[in-house]
Amino acid sequence: MRVLHVAGEFFPYVKVGGLGDVMAALPRAQRGLGMDVRVLLPGYPALLEGIPGLGEVGLIPDLLGQGPARILGGSAAHGVPVYLLDHPLYHRPGGPYDEWGDSHLKFGAFSFAAAMLGRHGDARGWTPQILHLHDWQTGLAPAYLRQMGEGPRTVMTVHNLAFQGIYSAGVARDLWLGPDLFHPHGVEFYGDLSFLKAGLQLSDRLTTVSPTYAQEIQTPAFGERLEGLLHHRRQDLVGILNGVDTTIWNPARSPHLGMHYSVTRMSGKLICKNHLQRELGLEEGGTTPLLGVVSRLTHQKGLDLLLERVDDLVSQGAQLAVLGTGEPALEEGYRAAADRHPGRVAVVPAYSEPHSHKVIAGCDALVVPSRFEPCGLTQLYALAYGTLPVVRHTGGLADTVVDESLGVGATGFSFHPPHAEALGETLARALRIYRGQPKRWAAMMGAAMRQRHGWAESAERYLAVYQALVP
Ligand code: ADP
C-alpha cells in the first residue's frame, strides 16, 4: 500500500501540538507493517535545514500564480521518506501558523501541491494510492483533485475541528477554484470558503483521533457547525486513537530526565519529583502532592477552570507546576497565582520539550480539564510515566483514562460538567486518595504504566480504512 501523508507539522522539526507527534510516529508505525508510506510537508526552514540529503524530485511550474515550486525528497532522522514543498511562501521565520495575511495562499498552495504530487507522482515514478490529509491546511487537496480528474483515493483526518481555515468567498479565484466547486457540496460554507469543510465534504473517508470525539462531533455541542455534514457522512467516519511513541516517551530512557524509572523500579520517580521541585523553586517534599499541567493555555484546554481552583488547592496543601504559553489572560492569571503562592505554585511560560518530560515525570498527577479534546496526548504520556491524569470526561480523555471509582484497572480521575466545582471535587478526591490510600494510588500508577497505547494497533486500523478504498 502506497500512502502519502500531507501535514503541516512533523516532530522534532516543526511542532505546535499533537499533530507534530502523530506525523512523526504514525508513518513509522505504518512502515513497520510493510507499507510504503511517505510524508509531504511545507518546506519550512527547520525542515530544509534538518532533513539530510535533499534533492529535487519534482517541479510545479506555477504554484497558484506564485511562480514555480520545487518538490524536494529526503529522509527524516527516523527513516521516513519526506517530500518538501520548496517555495518562498514557506521560507519565513516564526511558527508554522503565524499570520502573514496570506495563509489562504500558503495552505491553498500546499493543498494544490499535494494534489499534483498525488496525481502525477514524483520524478522517479512513485505515486500514492492513498492521499492521507491532516487538518484544514490540507483540506483543499480533494477539491483540486476533482478539478484535475483522476487521482488517488483520499482520507482526511481531523485532529481538531475547531480550526477550519475559513476565508471570504473572494479568495476562491486566487486559489484557482472554479465556480463549479463553490457550492454547499463543495468548498462553500455559509457563504465563505472553508478548507476543512472542503476536505470533509470531498474526501473518500474521514477519520478523527478518538472514538468518542467521532461521536461528539456529530452533535451541535462539539460539531462547530459541521455536525450535519459529519452526521450525514457517519458511515465514512471512524475514530482511531493516537498512540504513544515509546522511543521518545519512556521514563526508563528519556534523555531529559535526571533519573530513570520503570513500572518494576519506581524509586527514580521520586527523585524526578525532587529534581523538579528544586528546579522550579517549589518547597521540597516527597509526600507533598504535586500536580502538573503541560499544555497550550487556552479556553479549549479548560485551564481557566483550574485557575479558579488554585488557591483552594494550595490551601489543601498541594503544589502546582504549569508549563505552557497561550492566551494572555491565562498566562497572566497563572503568573499571579505563582506570585501569590511562592514555593507552592510554579509557572514555566515556555514551549520546552525537556521540561515537558520533567514535569510529566516529576508530578504525581497531570491535570487536563479540557472542554473538548479530540484525543489528547499529554494524558497518554502521563499514564506511561505513572503520573495519574485528572481529566474531563470528553473525547480521547474519556477513551483513555479509567476513573478511580471503577476500581480494579482504574488509571486516573475524571469529571463530567465543564465547571470549576466539578474539577475541584475531583481534585479533592484525588488528594484524599493520594494521602489516605497510598497503596491504592501505587496500584493505579502500576495499572497506568502497564496500559499499552502503542501505535501498532492504530496503524492496523488506518490500514483497514485504506483497504476499504484500495482493495
Ligand atoms: P494539542 O495538540 O491540542 O495542543 P495534545 O495533547 O494532542 O494537544 O498535544 C500536545 C503536545 O504538545 C504534546 O506533545 C505536549 O507534550 C506538547 N506540549 C504542549 N505544551 C507544551 C509546552 N509548553 N512545552 C512542550 N511541549 C508542550
Image (cartoon, grey):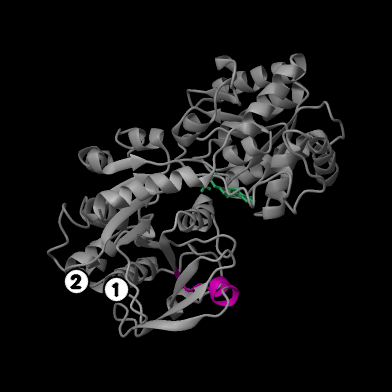
Q: Amino acid at mark 2?
A: Met
Residue 313 vs residue 80, the one in the foreground? 80
Please check the rendered image and state whether residue 353 is part of the magenta-colored stretch, yes or no: no
Note whether residue 348 is visible: no
Q: Image quarter for residue 101?
A: bottom left
**Which residue is depicted at the point 16% across and 62% down?**
181
Q: Quadrant of the N terminus?
A: bottom left
Which element is circle 2 on? helix
Q: Is residue 89 above or below residue 276?
A: below
N-terminal-most mark, 1 or 2: 1
Residue 461 vs residue 134, the one in the foreground? 461
Residue 271 vs residue 167, the one in the foreground? 271
For the image, the number of numbered tags is: 2
Q: Which mark is residue 148?
A: 2
Please check the rendered image and state whether residue 42 is part of the magenta-colored stretch, yes or no: yes
Do the residues under discs 1 and 2 have CB atoms within 8 angstroms?
Answer: yes
**Which residue is depicted at the point 62% across and 48% down?**
246
- Callout 2 crowding tier (Cα within 10 Å): few <14, some 14–19, many ≥20: few
**Which residue is depicted at the point 52% across and 25% down?**
419
Tag 1 residue: 116
Q: What span is in magenta?
A: 41-50
Which element is circle 1 on? helix
